[in-house]
Image (cartoon, rainbow, N blue to C red):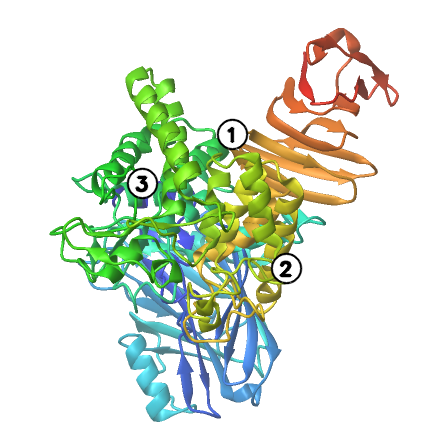
């Protein structure tokens, strides 16, 4: 067993829906065991093993590690719910329940197929079916025994060479064929129909003996099912739940590189990418989202990206089982994403892991993408590097922006000498300013003052160039600029990225807000279109020519927050979640959306369960609690009845919830504080015996399980606070005065 498989086994992540092409299958990866549901509808002579791209799979709630997984599966008009859970370590239970019959249930087979191959260099293990008990058993000298036990015996057990042979039998011999019945073989199939068993559970368990394995499986069948907790209620709907589900369902096993990672879409992995696919920014976003729940999954994604760093310094645009786009990169969000991962995980190792490669990637942009030497970067494809598809073409250079067919590229040419498009890109340069800001802080923390100074100076100089040279004063907007000095006509949401970088002046910010709200530009019911609505390309409704894309919404939202435009940010968050939620109700997590109808499935080019679709509900969670490099941890305190969490902050499980006029803050199931203050707490830090934050004040803060004699410090902007015992001695309550401009609140106590 490899180190990574041993790690998965030891951390309880053995069972999961690891195989990207078949999300309904459950595999115990370290032990090489797969449990696969298949269905056969006699009315249509139709067999399915529920591949990801079949249209017969609707993803339901699940945990990111696969402790619970729910799907709705359909075949020729028959629909049933399937739920997996893990009552014990290394034990899996599968339960199904019929939702709708498309034919007589007697003629609809639901079959459970098993394959156990602990060593890929050895043949699969034979199974034995006990006709008396209905148990299915297999043993291996090193891995012990496996038992599958059901609440009711299968109608029959059949044995086949493999899945293809089972499919062929159904399609050629039909429903009543009995010749494959047996009691022993390497590919068993336990058959049930929906007349006899419209709902049932089976369990599979490992043991050192047959009795131990069977007993564990029966115990699992008798265990009460635990419902997944709701992670977000009230404010933002069920946004955090959606982020969790998307990360969980798209997390799969890369058999080529023997590692887990979070794929772009299960429908793309084998069919499009030949076994695995790492699109740079996608995986950074996936790691960021995963960090809200699970440090290991976030780091696995980050390590997969960093492992492909190129000798020239760049992190490559795309790596798949078929192709390598090493001649280009993608928008430099790596430092921002890594900062988020480290902040959620509370683990300095994460920055140590990524710092040197992110720094090399940052420097690469300045040495390879300033094609005309004016100090402003543009997109490109490095001449003579690699042999990836589209290398050396304008399409390849456009692809580096991730906005492949955006009209912001239409007026550019490809400069063959440098490999660069003949325009400076406002989005790219703004992200590089932010990249330099984050990297300089990390350099300072490492004691590398020379690198920190170099990065600060570079970032500050680039910020000036963006602010002065990429501002179109005639149109009052940031815009891409051609090498000949003309501004590019088309405007994308990347023109808001100077807000994210802290580059825009207050006057420029006000002009940008006009563009944001103008219904002929980026305003309207569904937002944000990827180009202004009055641009001729908007009507194309093809990919980046008019459609709405989650990364654009996320980075624009964060920019608005950094610029202090909280109302505008709140409106964009509400719009983003409304757009996402109407698709989520249909089981979709879209790659992009129609900016007129809000639909994702209005044309064939959009993947309907795509990883970065989860950025839209992520925005809704950020309205409640967010981490940013410029304001630290922030919580927006609002009245009502709502909750968020648990989610990870600084390595701890955090819950924020409101009721009865109070907002409560819990850390690892322990209440830390409660307040009736409103506004925002920023630069928030909590421990079991302390709380500090920046706040405008005006209200009360309660500390539970404490007494006045244990209160060590209570100050607001340096002044002592008036505190007293409240609620029959249950709390210390401190009165915080309102103060224009706000102040720093510090509370410390002995537990």
Q: Tell me if mark 2 has few (under 14), some (14-19) or many (20+) residues whose alpha carbon lies within 10 angstroms of its own.
A: many
Give the residue drawn at x 26%, y 37%.
366
Residue 483 vs 722, above or below: the answer is below
Residue underneath mark 1: 630
- Which secondary structure, mark 1? loop
Question: Quick check: 330 left or right of 441?
Answer: left
Question: In front of the other: label 1 or label 3?
Answer: 3
Q: Position of residue 373 (x, y in %)?
A: 23, 39
Image quadrant where residue 19 sits: bottom left
Secondary structure under badge 2? Answer: helix
- Residue highlighted by disc 2: 578
Which quadrant of the structure image shows residue 126?
A: bottom left
Evaluate if marks 2 and 1 touch, with contact meaning CB atoms under 8 Å apart. no
Q: Are marks 1 and 3 in contact (CB under 8 Å)?
A: no
Q: Could you give the CA–CA distance between mark 2 and mark 3, rounded to whole angstroms?
A: 37 Å
Q: Where does the image place residue 579, in percent across and percent down from the top left?
A: 60, 61
Residue 376, label in figure: 3
Is 701 positioned to the left or the right of 601 in the image? right
């Amino acid at each position: 067993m490899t180190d990574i498989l041993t790690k998965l086994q030891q951390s309880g992540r053995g069972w999961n829906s690891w195989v990207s092409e078949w999300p309904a299958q459950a595999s115990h990866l370290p032990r090489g065991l797969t449990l696969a549901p298949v269905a056969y509808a006699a009315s249509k002579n139709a067999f399915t093993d529920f591949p990801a791209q079949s249209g017969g799979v609707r993803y339901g709630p699940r945990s990111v590690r696969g402790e619970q997984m729910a799907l709705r599966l359909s075949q020729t008009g028959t629909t049933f719910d399937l739920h997996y859970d893990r009552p014990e370590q290394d034990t899996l239970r599968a339960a199904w329940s019929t939702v709708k019959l498309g034919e007589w249930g007697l003629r609809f087979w639901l079959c459970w197929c098993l394959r156990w191959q602990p060593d890929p260099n050895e043949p699969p293990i034979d199974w034995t079916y006990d006709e008396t008990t209905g148990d299915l058993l297999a043993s291996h000298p090193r891995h012990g025994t496996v038992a599958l036990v059901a609440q009711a015996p299968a109608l029959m057990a059949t044995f086949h060479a493999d899945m293809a042979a089972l499919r062929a039998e159904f399609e050629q011999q039909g429903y009543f064929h009995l010749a494959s019945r047996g009691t022993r073989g390497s590919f068993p199939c336990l058959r049930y129909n929906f007349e006899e068993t419209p709902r049932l559970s089976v369990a599979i368990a490992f043991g050192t003996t047959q009795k131990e394995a069977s007993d564990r499986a029966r115990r699992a069948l008798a265990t009460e099912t635990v419902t997944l907790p709701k992670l977000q209620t009230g404010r933002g709907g069920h946004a955090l739940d959606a982020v969790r589900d998307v990360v969980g369902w798209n997390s799969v096993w890369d058999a080529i590189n023997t590692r887990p990672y979070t794929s772009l879409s299960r429908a793309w992995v084998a069919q499009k990418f030949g076994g695995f696919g790492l699109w740079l920014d996608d995986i950074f976003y996936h790691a960021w989202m995963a960090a809200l729940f699970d440090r290991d999954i976030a780091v696995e994604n980050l390590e997969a990206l960093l492992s492909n760093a190129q000798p020239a310094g760049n992190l490559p645009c795309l790596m798949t089982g078929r192709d390598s786009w090493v001649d280009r990169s993608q928008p430099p969000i790596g430092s921002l994403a890594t900062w988020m991962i480290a902040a959620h995980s509370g683990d300095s190792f994460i920055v140590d892991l990524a710092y040197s490669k992110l720094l090399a990637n940052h420097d690469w942009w300045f040495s390879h993408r300033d094609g005309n030497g004016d100090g402003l970067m543009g997109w490109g494809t490095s001449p003579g590097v690699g042999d990836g598809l589209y290398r050396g073409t304008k399409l390849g250079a456009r692809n580096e922006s991730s906005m492949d067919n955006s009209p912001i590229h239409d007026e550019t040419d490809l400069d063959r000498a440098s490999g660069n498009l003949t325009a400076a890109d406002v989005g790219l340069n703004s992200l590089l300013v932010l990249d330099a800001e984050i990297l300089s802080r990390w350099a300072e923390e490492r004691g590398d003052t020379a690198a920190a100074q170099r990065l600060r100076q570079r970032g500050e100089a680039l910020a000036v160039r963006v602010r002065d040279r990429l501002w179109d004063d005639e149109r009052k907007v940031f815009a891409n600029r051609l090498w000949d000095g003309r501004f590019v006509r088309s405007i994308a949401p990347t023109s808001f990225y100077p807000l994210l970088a802290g580059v825009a002046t207050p006057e420029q910010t006000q002009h940008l807000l006009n563009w944001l709200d103008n219904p002929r530009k980026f305003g309207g019911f569904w937002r944000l279109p990827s180009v202004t609505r009055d641009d001729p390309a908007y009507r194309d409704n093809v990919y980046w020519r008019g459609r709405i894309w989650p990364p654009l919404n996320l980075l624009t939202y964060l920019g608005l927050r950094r610029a202090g435009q909280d109302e505008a940010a709140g409106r964009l968050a509400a719009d983003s979640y409304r757009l996402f939620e109407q698709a989520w109700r249909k089981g979709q997590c879209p790659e992009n959306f129609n900016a007129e109808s809000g639909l994702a499935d209005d044309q064939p080019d959009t993947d309907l369960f795509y990883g970065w679709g989860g950025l839209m509900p992520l925005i809704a969670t950020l309205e409640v609690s967010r981490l940013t490099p410029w304001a630290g941890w922030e919580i927006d305190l609002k009245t009502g009845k709502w909750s968020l969490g648990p989610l990870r902050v600084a390595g701890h499980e955090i819950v924020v919830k409101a009721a009865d006029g109070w907002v409560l803050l819990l850390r690892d199931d322990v209440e830390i504080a409660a307040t009736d203050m409103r506004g925002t707490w920023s630069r928030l830090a909590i421990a079991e015996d302390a709380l500090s934050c920046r706040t405008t004040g005006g209200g009360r803060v309660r500390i539970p399980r404490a007494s006045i004699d244990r209160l060590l410090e209570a100050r607001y902007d340096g002044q002592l606070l008036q505190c007293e015992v409240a609620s029959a001695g249950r709390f210390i309550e401190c009165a915080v005065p309102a103060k224009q401009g706000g102040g720093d609140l510090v509370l410390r106590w002995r537990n």
